[in-house]
Amino acid sequence: MRAPGPGGPSRPLAEALAGGVVLLDGGLSNQLEAQGCDLSGELWSARLLADGPEQIVAAHTAYVRAGAQVLITAGYQASFEGFARRGTGREEAAGLFARSVELARRAAGAVDRDVWVAASVGPYGAVRADGSEYRGRYGLTVRELERFHRPRIEALAAAGPDVLALETVPDVDEARALLRVAAECGLPVWLSYTVAGGRTRAGQPLDEAFALVRGNEQVIAAGVNCCDPAEAEDAVRAAAEVAGKPVVVYPNSGERWDASAGAWSGPPTFAPALADTWRRSGARLIGGCCRVGPDTIAGLAAVLGGGDRRGG
């Protein structure tokens, strides 16, 4: 596997996970919105890679200062196709993928401790910007999904992140495609599904989903993200039992996303105290996703600091 990029941490993330719990950041988009950024449009936060890179650095830095030990880059909804629709050529787009890693690395330098950079590889549904990452089953074959993801993963891997975050994956078929392409770059990866009702969003059993990574040495963690916090404990247990890996978990705030209305509703239910239960169930990489901000990450740091959080 490749070594971390220039200016990276002193040891691999997998080694830190073997030593204790490592704290992830929270939702990048909500922090950018709190900073006054307009994230309308199909590129979402990825638009700021071109139009507001300093805002991305500021958002990452807010999480580092809250205690985050891993920063997930702003490339979740980025694609060569999406950049092309805004008039960005392929070479420039590749540079924007690289910039997503560089900006996170710059923010990681704000503290004198190890902070890892995870390059976000979102699902095909995210790039469609129609909420289909919460449904899966796009009507594409595994090979077609491989062709879509390959250029993105190649561009991100070339920038030298510490790990690829194959995240918010709704479907075992897409997970299979992502893992096949990631195997070509040699970087460590984590795989996290988005789940509902104890299954993937496409309806597959979690045992089937997590069995996909068992024995795959490139995968350093497996678990769930972008789901209701109430789903997390059972999913963590399933991942710990089946995958044979450290478990990654970073749920949403608990508010509900209405894709047709393009808005969140309902009260938040994410409580930092939940992290102790997740840790006891096997989670070693813990954070938050949509609508989970720096204050909550600071709360997680306080909870996890009282246990076996020795990753940093």
Image (cartoon, helix red, strand yellow):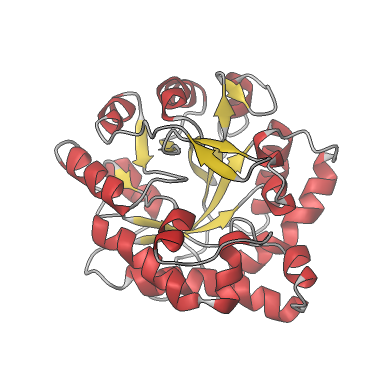
Q: Quadrant of residue 112?
A: bottom left
Tell which residue pokes out farthest to the left in this image.
306
Residue drawn at x 44%, y 54% as measured from the top left:
30
Inspect this view and state whether residue 161 appears.
yes
Inspect this view and state whether residue 10 appears.
no
Q: Quadrant of residue 167?
A: top right
Q: Horizontally, is 131 left or right of 265 in the view? A: right
Residue 2, position in %: x, y?
52, 63
Residue 247, position in %: x, y?
42, 34
Residue drawn at x 40%, y 43% as measured from the top left:
288
Residue 252, position in %: x, y?
45, 38
In the depicted view, which residue is nearer to us: 212 or 136?
136
Q: Horizontally, is 88 left or right of 163 in the view? A: right
Q: Horizontally, is 123 left or right of 284 in the view? A: right
Residue drawn at x 51%, y 28% as measured from the top left:
243
Residue drawn at x 54%, y 65% as measured from the top left:
38
Where does the C terminus fall, quadrant-wise?
bottom left
Residue 224, position in %: x, y?
50, 34
Image height of 36 relative to 193, above or below: below
Q: How many marks?
A: 0
Q: Horizontally, is 79 left or right of 2 in the view? A: right
Image height of 107 relative to 181, above or below: below
In the depicted view, which residue is nearer to us: 235 or 27?
27
Image height of 68 relative to 234, above or below: below
In the depicted view, which residue is nearer to us: 220 or 302?
302
